Image (tube, rainbow, N blue to C red):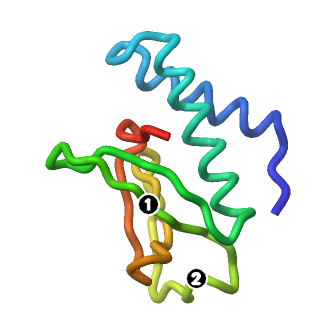
C-alpha cells in the first residue's frame, strides 16, 4: 500500500490542528508527524520497535506490526479511531492500542 506524501501532510495537519490548543502548534505538529511515520512504518515493516506512555503512567517498549500476512484476520466490522493507534504486538501475539497523544518514540 503506497501512501502519498500529500495524503500524509493532510493527515498530519488534521491531527496537529486537533491538538494545537492543548499542546501548542509546534509540539502538536511534531507529534502528528511521529504518529504518521510510525503507522507507515508499521504497515511496511515486519518488526517495528517503539515506545509510548500507558494510562497508568508507565512506559511501554513495544514491538509490533501491521503487515498483512503476519497479523490475523479481524472478524466483524471494525470502526477505526482517529485518536488511537492499533497494532499487532509481536511479543504477546495480540492486538494492542495506545492513545496517539502518548507516543514517545
Residue 18 is drawn in which quadrant?
top left
The N terminus lies in quadrant: bottom right
Give the SS element for disc 1.
strand
Q: Is residue 46 left or right of residue 92?
A: right
Q: Residue at x 52, y 24 (%)?
A: 16
Q: Which residue is mark 1?
A: 62
Q: Is residue 58 above or below residue 61?
A: above
Q: Residue placed farthest to the left in the image?
A: 56
Mark 2 Cα shell of 10 Å, populated few (<14), some (14-19), many (≥20) = some
The spot of residue 31 in percent (x, y) is 51, 29
Picture residue at 82% right of the left edge, 37% below the top: 5
Badges 2 and 1: C-beta atoms under 8 Å apart?
Answer: no
Local packing at callout 1 (Cα closer than 10 Å; few below 14, some 14-19, many 20+) is some
Residue 70 on image: x %, y % = 63, 84
Using the image as rendered, state which of residue 47 and residue 44 is in the foreground: 47
Q: Residue at x 29, y 47 (%)?
A: 59
> Residue 90: x percent and y percent?
50, 76
Which quadrant of the figure has residue 91?
A: bottom left
Element under disc 2 = loop
Query: Position of 54 compared to 87: left or right?
Result: left
Instruction: Give percent across and percent down for residue 53.
Output: 30, 44
For residue 71, the mark is 2
Depth check, front residue: 30 or 83: 30
Label 2 vs 1, first from the N-terminus = 1
Q: Is residue 22 left or right of residue 72?
A: left
Instruction: Work out whether 25 lies above or below 56.
Output: above
Calculate the distance from the C-alpha at mark 2 to the C-alpha at mark 1: 16 Å
**In the depicted view, which residue is nearer to us: 9 or 69?**
69
Amino acid at each position: 500500500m503506497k501512501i502519498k506524501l500529500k495524503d500524509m501532510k493532510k493527515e498530519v495537519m488534521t491531527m496537529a490542528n486537533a491538538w494545537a490548543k492543548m499542546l501548542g502548534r509546534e509540539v502538536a505538529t511534531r507529534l502528528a508527524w511521529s504518529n504518521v511515520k510510525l503507522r507507515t512504518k508499521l504497515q511496511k515493516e515486519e518488526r517495528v520497535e517503539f515506545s509510548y506512555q500507558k494510562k497508568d503512567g508507565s512506559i511501554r517498549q513495544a514491538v509490533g506490526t501491521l503487515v498483512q500476512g503476519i497479523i490475523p484476520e479481524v472478524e466483524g466490522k471494525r470502526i477505526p479511531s482517529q485518536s488511537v493507534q492499533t497494532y499487532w504486538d509481536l511479543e504477546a501475539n495480540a492486538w494492542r492500542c495506545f492513545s496517539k497523544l502518548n507516543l514517545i518514540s
